[in-house]
Amino acid sequence: MRRLVLAAGMAVLLAGCGNAAQTAKNPQPAGSAPPVRVHRVNVGDVVTLTGTDDAGGAGRLRLAVRVEQVVATAIGKGAFENPRKGERFMAVRFVLKNVGDTTYDDSPTYGAKAVDGSGRGYDPTVATVSAGAGFARVVRLRHGQSKSGFVVFAVPKKAKVTDVQYALNAEFAEDRGEWRVP
């Protein structure tokens, strides 16, 4: 009897989920996601990005973000810090400065992405490289404070990375900076 009740409950839950065909027939409203403002700049330029305060505060996050350095082929620091076969490490030095009134308290690596010429994006990987220190797992910046660190990506050896992207709120913010990689 218990199994029958559980099965009936699961059927009701799954019935509301729909499938790909139903989603194609009934797409989400076109205006449901806010548009993303993209700021395309060169390495070395500063972009002020905004985001929401994840701590439940009423303020808006505002960070001045700069890509200071791109190391196309970074060397792992330890004996076990090597990319997988066919890949290389790429390290990007970000400088973050809190220019807003709300405290930034997040992991900077969640907002970073490297993009190659074909449009494929690469998320950060956990690695320590000889180019320099990375960010702490969580960085806390009050108004006026800044921090810099390398974010490491594992990319295919043959990939030509053309852009480095950064957005607050784990890439869900309305602003995104894109730095052209020379």
Image (spheres, grey):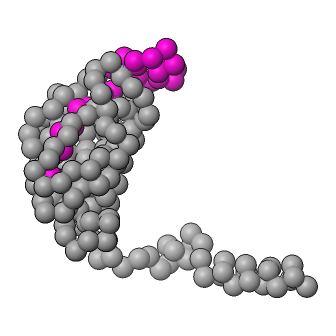
Is residue 139 within the magenta segment? Answer: no
Quadrant (top left, top right, bottom left, bottom right) of the N terminus: bottom right
* Nearer-the-camera pick, 98 or 119: 98
Residue visible at 39% across and 26% down? Answer: 128
Query: From this viewpoint, is residue 8 visible?
Result: yes
Range shown magenta: 73-98
Residue visible at 33% across and 76% down? Answer: 32
- Residue 42 in which image quadrant: top left
Residue visible at 40% across and 19% down? Answer: 76
Which residue reaches farthest top? 79
Q: Is residue 39 above or below residue 44?
A: below
- Residue 168 in which image quadrant: bottom left
Question: x%, y% of residue 5?
Answer: 82, 85
Question: x%, y% of residue 91?
Answer: 30, 28
Is residue 97 within the magenta segment? Answer: yes
Q: Is residue 143 above or below residue 165?
A: below
Question: x%, y% of residue 26?
Answer: 47, 80
Query: From this viewpoint, is residue 163 visible?
Result: no
